[in-house]
Image (cartoon, rainbow, N blue to C red):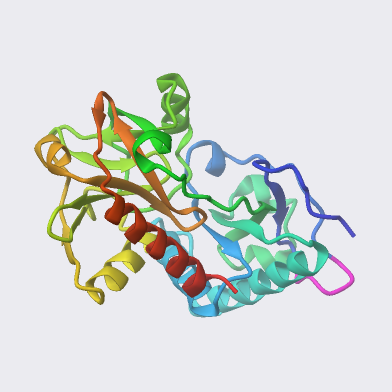
């Protein structure tokens, strides 16, 4: 039985070719397909163990995106893959002392897979891959003003920005070239849309949060969680692109995704966000509540 890879930041891959059992996990496979190379894949990432409803939200979005690209066939196939995914998640958890960051990736069944997958799985219309690595918990810094992330803005519009798909190589290359903690993409209308692997949420005075959403960018599950939580705690949520003028009025900026929760940004290009102390404490409460409500 293969043990989880304990190298942080590096994923171990499994392609589900048959239903796993307690005694058997699918062998790690080096499978390269045109679907992955061309970005014809959709994925979702989350930390595990997680509350079941959190997994369900990720799964539903994954299936929605797979259906949009046309390589999902039937509710029966969805239910079968979902059951297999949960089986593997739980087996991985039993094999490891650490919580894991998991990624589900769906690709269409194409000729490159025909000799690899069993006939039973070829009927599903798509293949499901699960990759995992030890979870690295995000620790918010003591001082957001000086110890937060430094990000740069770059002109770029993600293809099919309203969904999560595999064509992220250009984005990651640009992020590396930027020589910063992350980048925020600026669209043709000079609006800040999203970071390379995270949504953005601008925190304005008077308890107001602004975050871009579809069709400008994918409406992330974590920032959607924040919207529900914050509005229940007397904050106002506005779904709209962030302009430079709004950024200069902001008191703080967050990057959010399901594996990290929230990360504080201290500087965007040459602009330093003020991050008043009371806002820093509020964000710490948000982060802890997010972890309490999505992880077990």
Residue at image coords 25%, 74% = 233
Q: Main secondary structure of the magenta part?
A: loop
Q: Position of residue 110 (x, y in %)?
A: 59, 50
Quadrant that contains the C terminus: bottom right
Residue at image coords 42%, 66% = 61
The image quarter in which residue 286 lies: bottom left
Residue at image coords 59%, 67% = 124
Camera-side residue of 7 and 18: 7
Quadrant that contains the N terminus: bottom right
In the rendered view, does 121 fall on the left or right side of 231?
A: right
Q: How many numbered badges does the structure rendering display?
A: 0
In this view of the protein, can residue 129 be seen by the observer? no
Camera-side residue of 121 and 5: 5
Q: Position of residue 12 (x, y in %)?
A: 72, 48
Q: Position of residue 234 (x, y in %)?
A: 19, 72
234 is higher (above) or lower (below) than 181: below
Q: Magenta residues, as a range?
A: 18-24
């Amino acid at each position: 039985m293969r043990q989880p890879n304990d190298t942080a930041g590096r994923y171990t891959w499994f392609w589900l070719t048959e239903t796993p059992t307690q005694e058997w996990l699918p062998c790690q496979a080096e499978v390269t397909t045109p679907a992955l190379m061309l970005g014809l894949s959709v994925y979702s990432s989350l930390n595990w163990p997680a509350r079941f409803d959190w997994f369900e939200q990720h799964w539903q979005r994954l299936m929605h995106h797979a259906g949009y690209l046309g390589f999902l066939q039937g509710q029966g196939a969805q239910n079968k893959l979902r059951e297999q995914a949960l089986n593997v998640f739980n087996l991985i958890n039993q094999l490891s002392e650490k919580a894991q960051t998991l990624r589900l990736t769906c690709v269409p069944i194409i000729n490159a897979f025909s000799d690899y997958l069993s006939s039973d799985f070829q009927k599903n219309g798509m293949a499901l891959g699960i990759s995992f690595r030890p979870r690295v918990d995000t620790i918010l810094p003591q001082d957001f003003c000086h110890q937060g992330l430094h990000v740069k803005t770059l002109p770029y519009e993600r293809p099919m920005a309203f969904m999560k798909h595999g064509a992220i190589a250009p984005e990651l290359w640009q992020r590396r070239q930027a020589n910063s903690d992350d980048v925020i993409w600026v669209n043709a209308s000079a609006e800040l849309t999203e970071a390379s692997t995270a949504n953005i949420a601008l925190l304005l005075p008077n308890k107001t949060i602004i975050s871009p959403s579809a069709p400008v960018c994918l409406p992330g599950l974590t920032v959607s969680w924040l919207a529900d939580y914050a509005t229940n705690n007397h904050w106002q949520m506005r779904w709209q692109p962030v302009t430079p003028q709004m950024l200069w009025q902001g008191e703080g900026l967050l990057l959010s995704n399901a594996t990290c929760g929230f990360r504080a940004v201290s500087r965007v290009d040459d602009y330093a966000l003020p991050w008043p102390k009371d806002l820093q404490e509020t964000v710490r409460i948000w982060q802890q509540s997010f972890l309490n409500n999505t992880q077990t």
